[in-house]
Amino acid sequence: IAGITQAPTSQILAAGRRMTLRCTQDMRHNAMYWYRQDLGLGLRLIHYSNTAGTTGKGEVPDGYSVSRANTDDFPLTLASAVPSQTSVYFCASKPGANDTQYFGPGTRLTVL
Amino acid sequence: GESVGLHLPTLSVQEGDNSIINCAYSNSASDYFIWYKQESGKGPQFIIDIRSNMDKRQGQRVTVLLNKTVKHLSLQIAATQPGDSAVYFCAEAGGGYSTLTFGKGTMLLVSP
């Protein structure tokens, strides 16, 4: 069982480009999450999905979009990247309500 | 808004000592608390959790204490080892599918 996989591991991107960060889990977890982690600011929630077909906005959703077409995949898209989106991005999932979230290994994104 | 915070940004201990990492939370409606460990270059790793109907929960070498009266959470690590060196985050949430709010993190440094 792989758990949660994220791709790419790291990426350098020119400002203005479109980028999709991939997240896949093989645990059949209902809920999935995207966070960004910046030094001094901890982990901040970008978007979440409590079940396939539904999504919601977190604390810092601007500039990002998500989709949840199926249980396993939860891609995060930056439509037009800006340097302030330079960060480490973590995907997480949990089985259901009142459960613990488990995190993927992260994607380090640099926008120049 | 309400937030979770940590008292100490860095804690340095000697190998074999017991470590205590503290966390204050402000949302009295939170009923689920988690401690995560994050090593450099990796995603947060679940350590232990506790629900609001408990005061104490023990795991392997770790104990979480919850004091709802003063809204305080602590993580105790017994016989700290160099492999325990990492950043530790507390997080809190309400019930069901409510999202997690993370503290800023405390770095634990263990000297041999």
Image (spheres, rainbow, N blue to C red):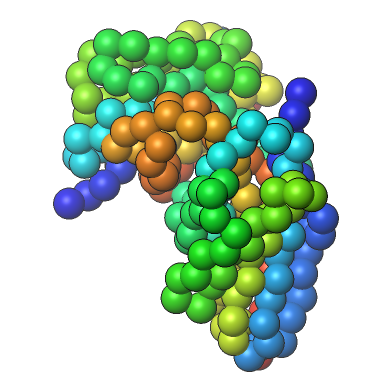
Residue at 35% in and 38% down = A94
Circle count: 0
**In-image side of B100 versus B16 (left or right):** left
Regarding residue A30, the answer to whether it shows in the image is yes
Q: Is residue A76 above or below residue B100?
A: above
Q: Position of residue A97 (x, y in %)?
A: 37, 32
Query: Dividing the picture into quarters, in which one does residue A5 lie?
Result: top left
Work out whether residue A87 or residue A11 is closer to the camera in this orientation and state it: A87
Q: Position of residue B34 (x, y in %)?
A: 54, 50
**In-image side of B61 versus A22 (left or right):** right
Work out whether residue A21 or residue A42 is closer to the camera in this orientation and state it: A42
Q: Is residue A76 above or below residue B69?
A: above
Q: Is residue B56 above or below residue A100?
A: below
Work out whether residue A106 or residue B5 is closer to the camera in this orientation and state it: B5
Query: Dividing the picture into quarters, in which one does residue A82 lie?
Result: top right
Q: Position of residue B87 (x, y in %)?
A: 63, 59
User: Which corner quadrant holds the N terminus of chain B?
Assistant: top right
User: Which corner quadrant holds the C terminus of chain B?
Assistant: bottom right
Furthest-right residue in this view: B7
Query: Dividing the picture into quarters, in which one does residue B101 lie?
Result: top right
Residue at 56% in and 70% down = B63
Residue at 60% in and 11% down = A62
Q: Position of residue A73 (x, y in %)?
A: 26, 26
Regarding residue B87, the answer to whether it shows in the image is no
